[in-house]
Image: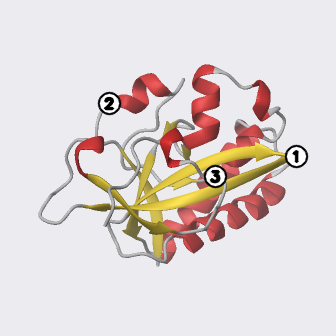
Amino acid sequence: MKLLRTIALDPSDTFMFDAAADPGEWAVSGAFRFCDQDPAKLAGKARAAFRSGFLGVKSWGWSTLTQIVPATEDDCRALIELLARQLVDRFGAPDVATARAAAEEEVAFVQSLCAHPISSLIAVHRSASGGEVREAFRRLQLREGQGHGKAFSFMEVEDDVEPDHDLHLADMGREPRPR
């Protein structure tokens, strides 16, 4: 089994988002955090979180990148329970049973994003059009011979996890170099 953990390759999340996730915490997409907001009216750090943030479940903060990591059944159950508690405490879910069902769906979605090898980095780009929120997920791969370093010194987009023809990489940073 594989899940997503937040990763901080540099301190940029601490000034990009109102609250940055702690490195190494379990992560989910977090798009649900914007369900009662008009994405077109978001500005500044809230807009940055909408467009490119994964939700750190423990801190309720945002991370630009997540990493695919191995996980156990116990890890998965603990993540579901933590997210369920957060949905009740921070998001106003009516009860733990309802929150748990929503948390199970979120974690199942995260697992669907983990089809790539362990240690792959995943980025998200969200957009809104016609009242619908679209999420596109990209796998970022280290350039050959490099380890984790500064975020923009070594990343190269390899392939889509979920194709989105409306995705504009210029909005996320530099485009991949031609092959």
Q: CA distance from mark 1 to mark 3?
A: 29 Å
The residue lying toward the viewer, choosing from 118 and 82, is 118
Q: How many residues crowd around disc 3 within 10 Å: few (fewer than 14), some, or many (20 or more)?
A: many
Q: Is residue 148 left or right of residue 85?
A: left
Disc 1 marks which amino acid?
Answer: Gly
- Secondary structure under the numbered disc 1 in the rendered image: loop
Q: Nearer the viewer, mark 1 or mark 2?
A: 1
Q: Nearer the viewer, mark 1 or mark 3?
A: 1
Q: Is residue 178 above or below residue 1?
A: above
Q: Which mark is residue 130?
A: 1
Percent coordinates x, y for residue 156 in the rendering: 33, 57
Q: Residue at x 50, y 76 (%)?
A: 73
Q: Is residue 98 left or right of residue 34?
A: right
Percent coordinates x, y for residue 172 in the rendering: 49, 42
Q: CA distance from mark 1 to mark 2?
A: 34 Å
Is the Cβ of the residue at disc 1 closer than 8 Å to that at disc 3?
no
Where the C terminus falls, by quadrant? bottom left
Disc 2 marks which amino acid?
Answer: Pro
Q: Is residue 3 left or right of residue 93?
A: left
- Secondary structure under the numbered disc 2 in the rendered image: loop
Q: CA distance from mark 3 to mark 2?
A: 25 Å
Residue that numbered label 2 is attached to:
11
Q: Earlier in the sequence, mark 1 or mark 3?
A: 3
Q: Residue at x 64, y 38 (%)?
A: 50
Residue that numbered label 3 is attached to:
83
Q: How many residues crowd around disc 2 within 10 Å: few (fewer than 14), some, or many (20 or more)?
A: few
Q: Residue at x 66, y 44 (%)?
A: 86
Q: Earlier in the sequence, mark 1 or mark 2?
A: 2
